[in-house]
Amino acid sequence: MGTVRNISLDIRNNSLKSIGNPSTNISPNHHGQTFLTSLKVSGNPWTCDCNIGWMEVWHRKKRQFLCNHEDPSTAPSNRYRDVEHYSTSKSTCLISDEDLEIAACADRKKPLAEAFKNDIECGWGAAGKCQSHLAIIISVVMAYIIMI
């Protein structure tokens, strides 16, 4: 991506099942890093798993930095005032939210936003659960070996 700071993607109706995260940063306007400012994904047969789980985290970050502030001067940092979405922040955020409600998981037969809330657990939380189950299994096996 080079020097592109903020990027908007409209990938609706392309038969995509998965897509990687184009952002290289968690907030907008960092030199040499890219932040996804808008994403439209409806009309694709998404496979809802952790390969697209980044969309949920991105959506929260986008709302944090670009949507919750009617006046850019009230944003977490004034450096975000250059992001063009501020001029239409309410409508841009509503359109993005609506698109996530329309976009569907082909494998789960439900909206993407609902799957993120109820079915898909990615990131540190999911890894912690797997690691704790593994730790229990290893502990039981070790205890059994010691008893023999």
Image (cartoon, rainbow, N blue to C red):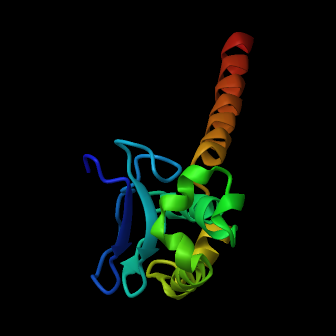
Could you tell me which residue is drawn at 32 percent across and 87 percent down? 13
Q: How far from the left and from the top, in percent, is residue 49?
A: 48, 63
Question: Looking at this view, is 120 or 95 the one in front?
Answer: 95
Q: How far from the left and from the top, in percent, is residue 124?
A: 62, 42
Left or right: 5, with 99 as reference point: left
Q: How far from the left and from the top, in percent, is residue 30?
A: 44, 45
Question: Looking at this view, is 19 or 10 the one in front?
Answer: 10
Q: Please identify the quarter of the rendering in which residue 128 is found.
A: top right
Q: Is residue 53 visible?
A: no
Query: In the rendered image of this protein, does residue 138 appear above or below residue 88?
Result: above
Q: Please identify the quarter of the rendering in which residue 7 is found.
A: bottom left
Judged from this view, the residue extending furthest toward the front is 73
Q: Is residue 56 visible?
A: yes
Question: Looking at this view, is 79 or 36 the one in front?
Answer: 79
Could you tell me which residue is drawn at 55 percent across and 56 percent down? 80
Could you tell me which residue is drawn at 57 percent across and 86 percent down? 98
